[in-house]
Image: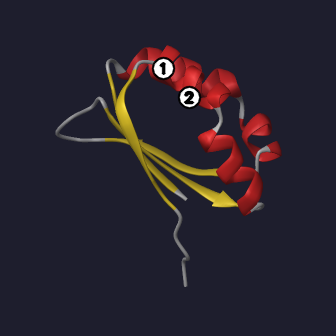
């Protein structure tokens, strides 16, 4: 799964992301692989996850709780979420 999102300011967003904890995301079926930020736009965030449970991951990313968390982190607009198979 890959997220692309624009944030107001990377540093506050990262504090919220790190504060959520990898263990929490793992219970939601998502295992952190590679968080990254843009070179030309450092407030553009890219996150790749391995998905251990597709149903849990989809439920988590679409939940109101997760949406509120991302809003509090300064996410602007709608995030792009893609579910991918890696061969």
| Picture quadrant where residue 27 is located | top right
Would you say 9 lies left or right of 47 here? Answer: left
Quick check: marks 1 and 2 in contact, CB under 8 Å? yes
Q: Is residue 68 above or below residue 43?
A: above
Q: Which residue is mark 2?
A: 67
Q: Is residue 20 above or below residue 32?
A: above
The one nearer the camera, 60 or 14, is 60
Q: Which residue is mark 1?
A: 71
Judged from this view, the residue extending furthest toward the left is 40
Q: Is residue 39 visible?
A: yes
Would you say 39 lies left or right of 25 here? Answer: left
Q: Secondary structure at mark 1?
A: helix
Question: Pointer 1: residues within 10 angstroms few (<14), some, or many (20+)?
Answer: some
Residue 52 point in image, percent of width and height = 76, 62
Residue at 29% from the left image edge and 29% from the top image edge: 43
Residue at 17% from the left image edge and 39% from the top image edge: 40
């Amino acid at each position: 799964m890959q997220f692309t999102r624009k944030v107001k300011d990377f540093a506050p967003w990262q504090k919220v992301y790190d504060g959520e904890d990898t263990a929490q995301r793992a219970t939601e079926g998502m295992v952190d692989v590679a968080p990254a930020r843009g070179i030309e736009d450092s407030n553009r965030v890219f996150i790749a996850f391995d998905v251990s449970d597709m149903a849990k991951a989809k439920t988590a990313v679409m939940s109101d709780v997760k949406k509120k968390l991302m809003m509090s982190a300064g996410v602007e607009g709608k995030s792009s979420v893609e579910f991918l198979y890696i061969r």
